[in-house]
Image: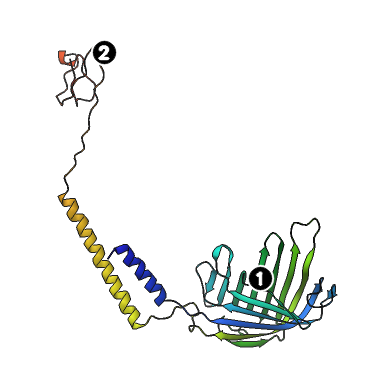
């Protein structure tokens, strides 16, 4: 078996054996819009001041890490953020915002952030999802963020565990949304929809929609014994194939003829004389008869008519 093909097969087997089952999380925030405007009637009549309206925001995240994402997994922080730009992976699957009984689907799969931080001074849970779009006819973007800053230890560090928290005391809930779409290539700005606002979440509920591996969240699942056996056999076969190939190369080299490289000196041209045939000799003494018409090649050749 070709060693290169065998190596590819082993890598594929290892990847499938070590594949992690991601935990899918749903985050539900609720609170109040502290400052907002609905210019085109997304949630209420056009030009409605949304301040004081209640809201709910829902995020759905995939906690499986990918190499193209920014990841922290330490004793005091768990964080994933990523974008689908250039074929990358966003942890956000979807997001939606509901105000005044009207729900707007953010989308949110373009870019997403999950952040959990625990320090000696505070604990933090933060989530973001957004999408940008432009097809040269319509352009725009939808962004939704929510976070809660609480006392140390009040919020859980793991980003893949269920919990409920209600803001109390000196806790701070913050967030924002921006929803807009407009026509491209028109002389004046024409919004299809536009609404924005600042949010003050007071509760957050984390629900496990699909359970993945246990913590630590970025550990991979342990392969089955059969997978280990196949991997061991594959690695052994690869070693044998590489050893045979090396032995064959060594044997071929030992039977191949040796090629000697010679330095071929080039004699100086002498006016009025025919080209000479170089041959190794002892260089003559300067001023002797043999020195006349000789080349100055450092004693490697002697040349005379």
Task: From the viewer's perspective, tell me whether residue 1 is left or right of residue 21.
Answer: left
Image quadrant holding the C terminus, namely top left
Q: Which residue does the numbered mark 1 point to in the structure image?
A: 130
Query: Residue 195 or 123: which is nearer the viewer?
Result: 195
Q: How far from the left and from the top, in percent, is residue 55?
A: 75, 82
Viewer-closest of 126 and 181: 181
Residue 103: mark:
none
- Does residue 151 appear anywhere in the picture? no
Q: How many labels does the image show?
A: 2
Does 275 sit above or below residue 12? above
Task: Give the vertical position of 7 relative to 35 (above or below).
Answer: above
Q: Which mark is residue 271?
A: 2
Image coords of residue 93 (percent x, y): 60, 76
Q: Position of residue 262 (x, y in %)?
A: 20, 35
Direction from residue 198 to residue 132 in the image, left or right: left
Q: Which image quarter: residue 123?
A: bottom right
Label 1 neighbour load within 10 Å: few <14, some 14-19, many 20+: many
Q: Residue at x 67, y 61 (%)?
A: 135
Viewer-side residue, 41 vs 169 = 41
Quarter placement of the N terminus: bottom left
Residue drawn at the location 55% of the way across and 69% of the way down: 89
Compared with 81, 281 (above or below) is above
Q: Position of residue 273 (x, y in %)?
A: 22, 13
Disc 2 is placed on an element classified as loop
Q: Residues at badges 1 and 2 in contact (C-beta under 8 Å)?
A: no
């Amino acid at each position: 078996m070709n060693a290169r093909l065998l190596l590819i097969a082993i890598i594929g087997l290892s990847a499938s054996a070590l594949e992690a089952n991601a935990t899918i999380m749903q985050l539900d925030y609720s609170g109040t819009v502290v400052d907002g405007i609905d210019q085109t009637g997304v949630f209420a009549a056009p030009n409605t001041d949304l301040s004081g309206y209640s809201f709910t925001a829902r995020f759905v995240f995939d906690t499986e890490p990918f190499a193209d994402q920014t990841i922290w997994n330490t004793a005091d922080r768990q964080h994933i953020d990523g974008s689908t730009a250039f074929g990358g992976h966003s942890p956000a699957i979807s997001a939606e915002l509901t105000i005044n009984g009207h729900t707007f689907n953010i989308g949110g799969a373009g870019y997403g952030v999950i952040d959990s931080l625990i320090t000696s001074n505070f604990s933090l849970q933060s989530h973001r999802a957004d999408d940008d779009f432009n097809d040269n006819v319509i352009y725009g973007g939808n962004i939704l963020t929510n976070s809660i800053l609480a006392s140390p230890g009040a919020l859980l560090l793991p980003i893949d565990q269920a919990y409920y928290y209600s803001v109390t005391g000196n806790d701070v809930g913050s967030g924002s949304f921006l929803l807009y779409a407009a026509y491209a290539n028109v002389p004046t700005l024409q919004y299809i929809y536009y609404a924005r606002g600042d949010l003050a979440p007071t509760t957050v509920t984390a629900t496990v929609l699909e359970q993945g591996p246990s913590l630590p969240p970025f550990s991979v699942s342990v392969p089955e014994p059969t997978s280990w056996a196949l991997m061991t056999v594959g690695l052994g076969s690869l070693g044998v194939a590489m050893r045979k190939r090396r032995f064959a190369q060594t044997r071929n080299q030992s039977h191949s003829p040796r090629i000697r490289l010679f330095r071929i000196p080039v004699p100086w041209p002498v006016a009025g004389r025919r080209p000479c045939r170089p041959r190794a000799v002892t260089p003559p003494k300067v001023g002797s008869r043999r020195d006349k018409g000789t080349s100055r090649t450092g004693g490697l050749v002697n040349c005379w008519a």
